[in-house]
Amino acid sequence: MSRTVYVNGDYVAEEDAKVSVFDRGFLFADGVYEVTSVLGSKLIDFEGHARRLERSLDELDMTSPVTMDELLEIHRQLVERNGVEEGMVYLQITRGAADRDFAYPKDAAPTLVLFTQEKTLIESPAAKVGMKVISIEDQRWGRRDIKTVQLLYPSMGKMMAKAAGADDAWMVEDGFVTEGTSNNAYIVTKDGVLVTRHLGNEILHGITRAAVLRFAREAQMKVEERAFTVEEAKNAAEAFITSASTFVMPVVEFDGEAIGEGTPGPVASRLREIYLDESLKAAV
């Protein structure tokens, strides 16, 4: 049975969904996106994702074809129509369709597409055993803080990790970890300090990142927002990632070397519990 998807004002069967071959998202990766998790048929941290979407659009001088209230209703409709209990809602806004030209079109109508994906999130097998990551050179563009659809190099990074027998890759610039291919990266030092890279143009300003750091501070954990090196990661007591689709996910191996005991650590495990508890309470 096909999914119902949303394309430019219409709810249609996925096999009937169409976007112009002249869409700038297809020709130039001229678009932005967001992914919101669904638990118990409710949306997790929608407001945070909506705020980041507006920021991404502003940074690219783009406009949204709908209001954020309308976007919330579209999310809810898709969750209901597709009977999603647990999974994600993906949205993409592009500058729209226009004859191919590097210069932005002045009058193109933005393209808006949304679809759902069902996925086991809470009882994820990886959360119980932890992930293995490798390091790769960060070769992305300089404005990683904008959540654009320019995802070719992160996709290549995922494939590099799989070829190496790992689950994901952490990108490295000048000896310092920036972030994962689709997630923010963290270590916990042997002194119990939670460390993650500071915000800037080098990394995506993760919505889950912001929530997890807030919960960590409320739990009286010491947090440092700074860059950390590959060697610091290898010598850490534990490590983890955060994203909308993984929540808090332990990392137990880096470049073939065990981190800590090589098993999910207590800080990551506790933060995952707190994040799920608090996010479910606030879900819409």
Image (cartoon, rainbow, N blue to C red):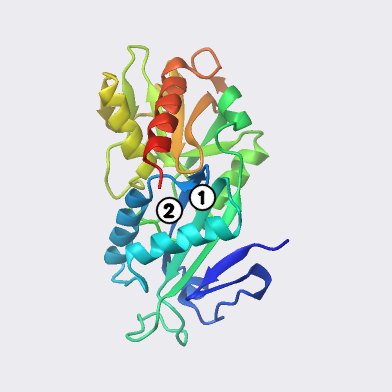
Asked whether the residues under the numbered discs 1 and 2 touch, taking CB atoms below 8 Å apart as contact, a structural biologist would say: yes
Closest to the observer, 280 or 49? 280
Residue 11 vs residue 186: left or right? right
Q: Which residue is the site of mark 1?
A: 154
Q: Is residue 76 visible?
A: yes
Q: Residue at x 46, y 76 (%)?
A: 24
Classify 10 Å Cα crowding around label 2: few (below 14), some (14-19), many (20 and above): some
Badge 2 marks a residue whose secondary structure is loop
Q: Which residue is the site of mark 2?
A: 140
Closest to the observer, 234 or 35? 35
Q: Residue at x 66, y 33 (%)?
A: 165
Q: Earlier in the sequence, mark 1 or mark 2?
A: 2
* Above/below status of 67 relative to 213: below
* Above/below status of 211 relative to 222: below
Residue 234 vs residue 105: left or right? right
Q: Residue at x 64, y 70 (%)?
A: 13
* Above/below status of 214 relative to 71: above
